[in-house]
Image (tube, rainbow, N blue to C red):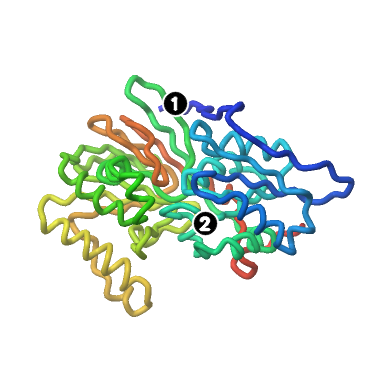
Amino acid sequence: MEPETDDRTAPDATEATPPAATETAQRLAAVIYNPVKVDVEELRAAIAAEPASADWAETAWYETTEADPGGGQAKQALEAGADLVIAAGGDGTIRAVAEVLGGTSTSLALLPSGTGNLLARNLDLTLDDMEHSIRTAFDGVDRRIDLAWADIRREGGGVERAAYLVMAGFGLDAKMVSNTDDDLKAKVGWLAYVDAIRKALREENRMRIKYRVDGHGTHSVSAHTLIIGNCGSLPANILLLPTAAIDDGRFEAVFLRPESAWGWTQILVKVIWENGVLRRTRLGRKLVSRDVDALRYVRGQRMDVVLSHPDEIELDGDTFGRAEAFRTWIDAGALTVRVPAGDGEPTAE
């Protein structure tokens, strides 16, 4: 599958406030915010009140739109010379911004404002604390993490390239995302996915998947769902991919292939009890059982997937249409994120 670059940004879909010119060599911070998720006036006041922000030039502000969820704004921030980009929004905003910042020296700071906040959870960042997040942005340290990329082959042969930070998925995983009611999610948060799972289980999800990891042989498996993770934690403290690490240069993937109610029981015990409880302690890890029939885990740096029929795909909780084939790989250490002092690897200024 030959990759093609997909440029989905809309240059005229951004409302930006450029920073004032400065005579000093102050660093520049830019805020890319989703107006649906963020109270921008509250955010402006909080940044103005952060003492460390006084050492920076006037902050640049970029608003996302439905047509451009963050990629175009991130390009504008880079063109303006931003040293730091604060992404204030949900997982979709963060993914779109990270896709542009990957491979650059500009740091990404997170102001989690969505339902899942998947990257923030996997980085053990504080949620629902704007002041702490802003303090981390201006006074924290840099940490290098991996960025995952995907070439998605559509029906008809077109290829779309996109990045993701946490997980990509086919089958039940993607159908759950597409079935989730946005209004319900706004009211009850991640619990809205429970109803989405119920709807997805009514459908026939099993498919034949051919895959190759790191170029070593082609395997075939009948599976309900395929999830590839750059990191492994989900809301509600669910550890789906127990050996996935966001800075090890590798992914972990899992095939869910239950054939009966007993198969679903195996999955629940493995994911909720063994991964979520036992693996979190040294003694518990010694008690973890071997892999069960309903789950198959693989690890690697690159994975090629061909589906028996086109199916829906999701990246970091956003639907990405239907795909008939998929190639994913890890760009090790490609993204710099801001974390609280003491949590990262300080770099020389």
Seen in the picture, residue 146 relative to 289 is either above or below; the reply is above
Quadrant in the picture for residue 288: bottom left
| Res 45 → quadrant | bottom right
Characterize the local packing of mark 2: few (<14), some (14-19) or many (20 or more) Cα atoms within 10 angstroms: many
Which quadrant of the figure has residue 144? bottom right
- Residue at horizontal 31 percent and vertical 40 percent from the top: 178
Q: Which residue is mark 2?
A: 247
* Residue at the far right in the pictured view: 23
| Left or right: residue 108 compared with residue 158 | right
Name the foreground residue: 163 vs 252: 163
Instruction: Please state which of residues 228 and 53 is positioned toward the viewer in this rendering.
Output: 53
Side of 186 where 15 appears, left or right: right
At x 34%, y 71%, the residue is: 279
User: What's the amino acid at mark 2?
Assistant: Asp
Quadrant of the rendering where the C terminus is positioned: bottom right
Dot 1 surroundings within 10 Å: few (below 14), some, or many (20 or more)?
A: few
Where residue 82 appears, as percent x and y from the top left, is 71, 44
Say whether residue 251 is visible. yes
Q: CA distance from mark 1 to mark 2?
A: 27 Å
Give the residue type at disc 1. Glu
- Seen from the viewer's position, the closer of residues 325 and 203 is 203
Rendered-image quadrant of the N terminus: top left
> Which residue is the extreme one toward the top?
156
The residue beneath circle 1 is 2
Residue 331 vertical position relative to residue 13 in the rendered view, above or below: below
Measuring 83% from the left and 41% from the top, which residue is drawn there? 21
- Answer above or below: position of 189 versus 325: below
Secondary structure of the residue carrying tag 1 is loop
